[in-house]
Image (cartoon, rainbow, N blue to C red):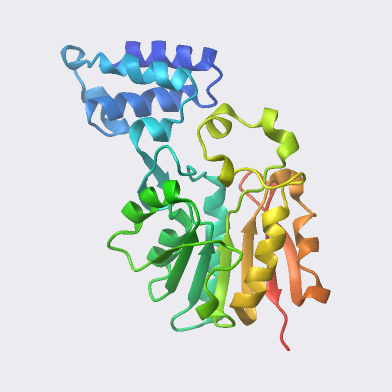
Amino acid sequence: MLLAEVAQATQRLADAGVPSPRTDAEELAAFVHGVKRGQLHSVRDADFDARYWEVIARREQREPLQHITGRAYFRYLELQVGPGVFVPRPETESVVGWAIDAVRAMDVVEPSIVDLCTGSGAIALALAQEVPRSRVHAVELSEDALRWTRKNVEGSRVDLRQGDALTAFPDLDGQVDLVISNPPYIPLTEWEYVAPEARDYDPEMALFSGEDGLDLIRGIERTAHRLLRPGGVVVIEHADTQGGQVPWIFTEERGWADAADHPDLNNRPRFATARKALP
């Protein structure tokens, strides 16, 4: 069994400041030995692979676990990720959960959904999988990110395009039921406080958005209003420190109704929603 090695690796990762040292030590042991995490007990001492210490050393340097294994888990999906694409986070799963419930409540036979700043494709693919008759469209600007997105959406029915979220999908104006986005939202002033895994490895373009972090969200507000049909809904993730600020971007004067903030699983404000006002 790998218990002694995993325990030693856990301590090394904890000393390096890794937030979930035990989980990561076990995930990396499973990755190197080609088993699932729950099967580590089946690996004999004689089969221990010394490459384990190489990947532990990489994680000690705060290289993301997902870059080392090449995969990220999101809701019911396993995605390919690596340098150049934003690694999807667990908190975004609750954003998608809300969106799925909202689309189902619309009682539309083939709901039209747009994912802006799709990155790895996590949001778009989850919606396509969990809302079976939906028509899901996704846009990403970065060519580096798209190398991964294309791998992930291959064989799915997601309509993936390269382009700017602010000008995307003119062919869908006024026809979309739900617009969703996890855009960059970290203020430039917060750079030094960002976890090394994100700051040093996630693409800067996917993290930062102006002095207050809300530059792109302000632009997406206009895009969403252009794309949505009257009564359609926008769902947008933001930082927990921006609770209360984002709903104020979706004002009645700009054609919105029911703007509200929603908490994540840790009860922190995590995403805002609004409905395009009826004429």
Instruction: Please give left or right for residue 89 compared with residue 250 in the image.
Output: left
- Rendered view: 243 above or below 23: below
Q: State the residue at coordinates (69%, 28%).
A: 192
Residue closest to the eye, 10 or 237: 237
User: Residue placed farthest to the left in the image?
Assistant: 46
* Residue 193, image x, y percentages: 69, 29
Circle count: 0
Q: Is residue 142 above or below residue 18?
A: below
Give how far across and how far down residue 34 sits, in percent. Answer: 22, 30
Left or right of 69 in this view: 19:
right
Residue 264, above or below 131: above
Quadrant (top left, top right, bottom left, bottom right) of the N terminus: top left
Residue at 70 percent of width and 45 percent of height? 240
> Which residue is farthest right?
253
**Quadrant placement of the C terminus:** bottom right
Q: Farthest residue toward the bottom?
A: 279
Is residue 202 visible to us here?
A: yes
Residue 147 x, y percent position in the rendering = 37, 49
Q: Is 162 in front, or is 77?
A: 162
Is 148 displayed left or right of 266 in the figure?
Answer: left
The quarter of the picture where residue 128 lies is bottom left
Residue at the location (77% across, 46% down)?
212
Q: x, y percentage for residue 61?
A: 48, 19
Residue 273 visible in the displayed image? no
- Residue at the (76%, 51%) spot, across then down: 243
Left/right of residue 72 with respect to residue 235 in the rendered view = left
